[in-house]
Amino acid sequence: MTETPFKIAVSDQDLDLLKKKLDLARFPDELEDVGRDYGAPLKDIQRLVAHWKDGYDWRKHEAQLNEELPQFTRDIEVEGFGPLNVHYVHKKSSTGTAIPLLFVHGWPGSFLEVRKILPLLVEESPEHPSFHVVAIGLPGYGFSEAPKKRGFAIDQYAEISHKLMLALGYNEYVTQGGDWGAIITRTISAKYGGKHSKAWHTNFPVTAPPHPWNRPGLFLQYLVTRLTPAEKAGLERTQWFRTEGRGYFMEQSTQPQTLGYGLADSPAGLLGWIYEKLVNWTDDYPWTDDEVLTWISIYWFSRAGPAASVRIYYEYMKAGADFGGPAVRVPTGYSFFPKELVALPRYWLRGKHVVFESQHESGGHFAAYERPKELVGDLRKMFGKGGPAFGAVASHNGFKL
């Protein structure tokens, strides 16, 4: 499991092919005055395609990513799947006793999501803890190798992430994630908690709803508890997502290969598929065209191709989806952002291992990218002096000795 330094280096041939495909893009028609009701607006996609083809400078952004993010690859053995070559970002704080933190992204994200929080997390200060940060590129995403066999599900993503931390010398560590990263880091906490995974924080707090049979105590509390305006708005957001925003989930979890042909062959199609989520899933985040195209370009130039990234949905459902589990018995922290896709009342998620909660006034699904200061602030409070998870990693409390 030798570590190899990595720099993003897209070939000139791949850049030329992208330009040719963008030249040949064929757009659908659009009804009058529909806004975003039917999906990504035609004018937005036409503008972005034109900029991607003639204005956007990938080489500039490639160089910036390489300068900002210390990147590496190494082979990690996954039981039943053999070794996979994994790409990751690894940056240590100048504080030797900084807290080892594993950051895990989701879909349609990538290792890019760590970009804004990385300098804040490694920052040294007597006022807050510092972190050694590892941001894994999940297999099938970005520049990580994709599995070749079926059945690579959440347990396997958890296994490879955990083994990466061990390979880097972090026998004890904490985790943070949103989207699939939340499901994966929760599984890490359940499988490797106590001995290795010492605490868990997520900005995607999800659980099973109150039910008279499965969660009778919570169901009775739900019947007699008056929801706050923020909680009502959260449940309305959740209902919107389930009825109007979740079609992608059904396709990716049932027929990912069929969808993959369009994602792999058409950059305009890939752009439309992901751009819709970047806008709908954030809280009025002011995306620039270059930001969007850098995000999408990582998918287009990914090692396995963009189709590989959506198979996690299929494998998750086939393995028996459980958004309420597994049970975690390590200190747990939740950050609540109002435009998250599933925004549940906080009391639905409370338990004896939940030691930290933070409610924010704004922010959506991509908290690390939309609200980096707020997310890092929550981690500093949770793991800082006087915080409920201070000293979770006994030998690395985040402060200079």
Image (tube, helix red, strand yellow):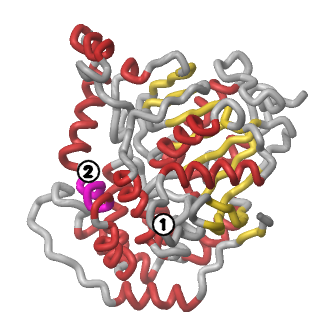
In the rendered structure, the answer to whether residue 225 lies left or right of residue 299 reads: left
Residue carrying label 1: 290
Give the residues drawn in magenta, as a range: 246-252
Residue toward you, 225 or 57: 225
Question: Is 179 contained in the magenta span?
Answer: no
* Image location of residue 206, percent across then percent down: 39, 34
Of the image marks 2 and 1, the number of the one nearer the N terminus: 2
Question: Is 251 contained in the magenta span?
Answer: yes
Residue 192's place in the image compared with 291, above or below, is above
Residue carrying label 2: 246
* Image location of residue 127, percent across then percent down: 76, 25
Residue toward you, 73 or 301: 73
Task: State the image quarter where residue 93 is shown.
Answer: top right
Mark 2 crowd level (few <14, some 14–19, many ≥20, 10 Å Cα): few
Mark 1 is on which residue type? Asp
Q: Say which residue appears at 72% left-offset and 70% top-offset.
A: 6
